[in-house]
Image (cartoon, grey):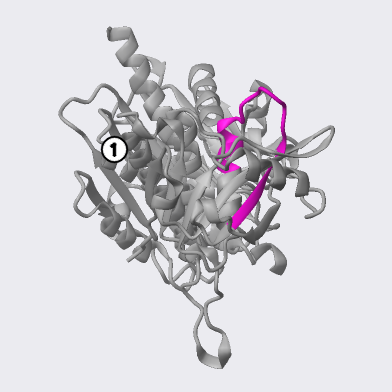
Amino acid sequence: MIKSSELNLTAVAKDLKKSGCEALVIGTGQSPDGPVLLDNPLSAKAARALSDSLPLLGVTGAADEVRRLPGLPETGSEVLVLVGTGRAVQGRPLSEETLRRSAGSAVRQLDGIESALIALPAATVAEAAAVAEGAAMGAYSYTEHYSAVGGKAPRPSARSLSKVTIFTPAAQDRTLRAALDRAAVLARGVNITRTLVNQPPSHLYPESFAQAARDLAKGLPIKVTVFDEKKLEKDGYGGILGVGKGSDRPPRLVKLEYAPAKSKVNLAFVGKGITFDSGGLSLKPGPGMQTMKLDMAGAAVVLNTVVAIAELGLPVTVSGWLCLAENMPSGTAQRPSDVMTTYGGRTVEVLNTDAEGRLVMADALAAASEEGPDAIIDIATLTGAQMVALGKRVSGVMGDDGVRDAIKAAADRAGEQFWPMPMPEELRSSLDSQIADIANIGEKFGGMMTAAVFLREFVGEINGEKIPWAHLDIAGPAFNEGGAHGYTPKAATGVGVRTLLAYVEDVVRRLDRDAG
């Protein structure tokens, strides 16, 4: 059973000592004149003395900088924590994303602390919620496979933190409780996504992933249907079957359905779920396989987005399609030059077995289209070309202008970095095959966009019009191979959950506005 540790999130507007927290976290920033202490609940005398001491303490106010000091008697906390927020401009409030990252950075680095009062400048409900989100995401850890044998016990860390209290003037606002509850749901979705991606392929494979989906949906109004290899063959899901036939662990297609009575819109999400990608017979080099457990991140995002939508009771009908397979070389694996028939009858010439994600997603895009949703969003760790174009922290989004731009706006609001990319029409001809309807690889340069052009071929129509669609490529941002930063740990990041949830909320808000 995949689980996520939970933070108890509360808020206060005064009486710091009554919070009963071990640590008080306040912010510092960088200014042209040196480090500055940001707005905080300390007395004027204590704040002035601390501010004067910042240079002597080596505090710069840089983002991710955390300093621990003995607590001040007036706060009732044993530890005073200074967390850097980066550049500070007098009179300008911190952005919500800066608050998220600063709270996450502080919590992530609070070894051995079980409760913390975070007093960053958060005057509004939205700002307090951002602090809560950052703290809850920063509290994540993955220690499942440590043992005490040979002294290799789980490392002590702040991630044993169980209680966070947010100091904010908005503590008495009646809408804050709902905002904190949403923050908890959101962070849980991100953190469980991280745990799924961090699972080793020895433990997470198509069948166990399908069981995890059942477990996470249990008790929620979500219908879970699992297509095993026999059902996939009977119904013609040749893309998923073709990719998975080289492994002795057969593929699965998981369909999640959430349909509340007062639904206002019908959306479909499709996620790539390659639980391990060796490249198949087009074998990756050894170093290129070391992180390939991450190749199911898109499916993990879709699963946890649907769960979060159900937990929040949003008035949308949503289907989630998890395309689960293990891409392995063997005597039964698909070969370069094979032709497969995807769901709906379209044929694909497989020129490279390491371009497998688009094959499993082709099946699900076609199947999702048959249900006539108002929009389809797919998300995948699809191409190395994404990292060449946008680096390891910025995801690409392609598709129809309306959906693409709505995704970008939602990502900006949620605090995730997505960038719109084009799909030049001339790339389609590079996917032409002499023996099948389409080839699975085409133009090398601009490969992220070529992959999107391939996927677009499998999006269906309603009354002669293409279903609105967008494709999200999170290949680099899904897995952090560098150092931890802000609320982002090493390894799996959970990127995409916040953007998809914000997109759904924006759609509902827009429909409410239009109806009103």
Q: In the figure, residue 366 lies in which quadrant?
A: top left
Q: Which residue lies furthest to the right in this view?
A: 33
The answer to if 83 sits in the magenta stretch is yes
Residue at image position (43%, 48%) is 165
Give above or below for 459 relative to 515.
below
Left or right of 36? Residue 299 is left
Which residue has dot 1 on it?
312
User: Looking at numbered disc 1 in the image, what kind of residue is underneath it?
Assistant: Leu
In the rendered image, the quadrant that contains the C terminus is: top left
Residue 262 place in picture, x, y as percent:
18, 25
Left or right of 21? Residue 229 is left
Q: Report whether residue 264 is seen.
A: yes
Residue span colored magenta: 80-101
Q: Residue furthest left?
A: 261
Residue at image position (59%, 52%) is 106
Give above or below for 470 relative to 114.
above
Residue at image position (36%, 39%) is 182
Q: What element carries label 1?
A: helix
Q: How crowded is mark 1: few (under 14 residues within 10 Å), some or many (20 or more)?
A: some
Task: Pick the residue in front: 193 or 413.
Answer: 413
Residue 144 place in picture, x, y as percent:
46, 73
Task: Pick the residue in front: 64 or 11.
Answer: 11
In the rendered image, the quadrant that contains the N terminus is: bottom left
The answer to if 231 sits in the magenta stretch is no
Task: Pick the residue in front: 111 or 492.
Answer: 111
Residue 301 place in picture, x, y as percent:
44, 46
Q: Report whether residue 433 is seen.
A: no
Q: Which residue lies furthest to the bottom in this view?
A: 150
